[in-house]
Amino acid sequence: MPEIVALNAALGARIEGLDRSRANDPAVAALLDKALADHLLVVIPGAPMSPEQTRDLARAFGEPRAQLRRSKRDNSVPEVSLMVSTIKTDGTTDKTVYRAEDWHTDDSYFEIPAKATLLHSIEIPSRGGSTWFCNMHSVYDALPDATKRRIDGKRAIHGYDTPRAKNRPAPRTPQELAETPDVEHPLVRTHPVTGRKAVYLNPNRLDRIVGLPRSESDALLDKLTEEARKPKHHHGHVWNVGDVVVWDNRATLHRVVNDYPAGEPRIMHRVLLQGERPA
Ligand SMILES: [Fe+2]
């Protein structure tokens, strides 16, 4: 059986000794999925895989599902997205690259957001481009009791875009627009596996708290975001080619650092795992 080695960090564990082709053996898959819930981030080193292999490995953590933006889906394996975050000097850099530089959790604009995301590095730049993660259980735990009382039981509106986000997303097709109305989620989520509470924040998508005037909602969201920006809740992953990294969107935020050289390819496979209604 593979070994789960906790990182000496705010979150994360490294999976050692895993034969990726055996990841879907029931006992191994259960171990991996439990490690994800416990550590919120798992790193599985190895060699680059085909889109089919990436999708199959993702199945150890749940049911892969195709992402909203059709243009990113792999032609033959639609559950795998090809994420090209190469910074181009001709002004054609994918807007997602700039959006991803701000803290976010994937898919919170859906009623049923992805429970987890798998990212697999195919090509990485010679330096920079690390991905950072924030432990939203520890963010919740660090809040003053009075703030916890203010946010417990509150609900919030998430949209595909919000003026609170620093950068605008790429345009959606009419079909994609129809699939992304605003949705409402609890501001504090209880993790369905561990029972721990997390602030369900998304600085890129969360527009307002239900029942509060805009100014009060903005002030409270700013305060929560300020706690989440503290480095004590963070861990950064420095990529090697072939790495698989899986994070739990129910209790983490992530961001990429766009400090890598322009023109150097940064290409990942991504798989989103079907989640449950936040509660
Ligand atoms: Fe993301």
Image: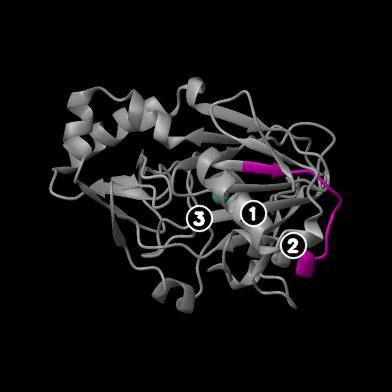
Which residue is the site of mark 1?
118
Q: Residue 81, percent across and down?
A: 67, 64
What kind of element bears circle 1? strand
**Contact, CB < 8 Å: mark 1 with mark 2?**
yes
N-term mark: 3 or 1: 1
Q: Nearer the viewer, residue 275 or 163?
A: 275
Quarter of the image that includes the C terminus: bottom left
Asked whether mark 1 lies closer than 8 Å to ligand 1, one says: no
**Apparent side of residue 176 relative to residue 219 in the rendered image (left or right):** right
The residue depicted at 72 percent of the width and 67 percent of the height is 56
Q: Provide the residue span drawn in magenta.
A: 42-53
| Amino acid found under the numbered disc labelled 1 | Leu
**Apparent side of residue 66 relative to residue 269 in the rendered image (left or right):** left
Whether 175 is drawn above or below 29: the answer is below
Q: Residue 74, percent across and down?
A: 72, 71
Q: Residue 117, percent across and down?
A: 58, 54
The residue depicted at 25 percent of the width and 47 percent of the height is 208
The residue depicted at 34 percent of the width and 28 percent of the height is 141
| Amino acid found under the numbered disc labelled 2 | Thr
In the rendered structure, find residue 54 and report the number of the disc placed on it. 2
What kind of element bears circle 3? loop
Whether 56 is drawn above or below 208: the answer is below
Residue 223 found in image quarter: top left
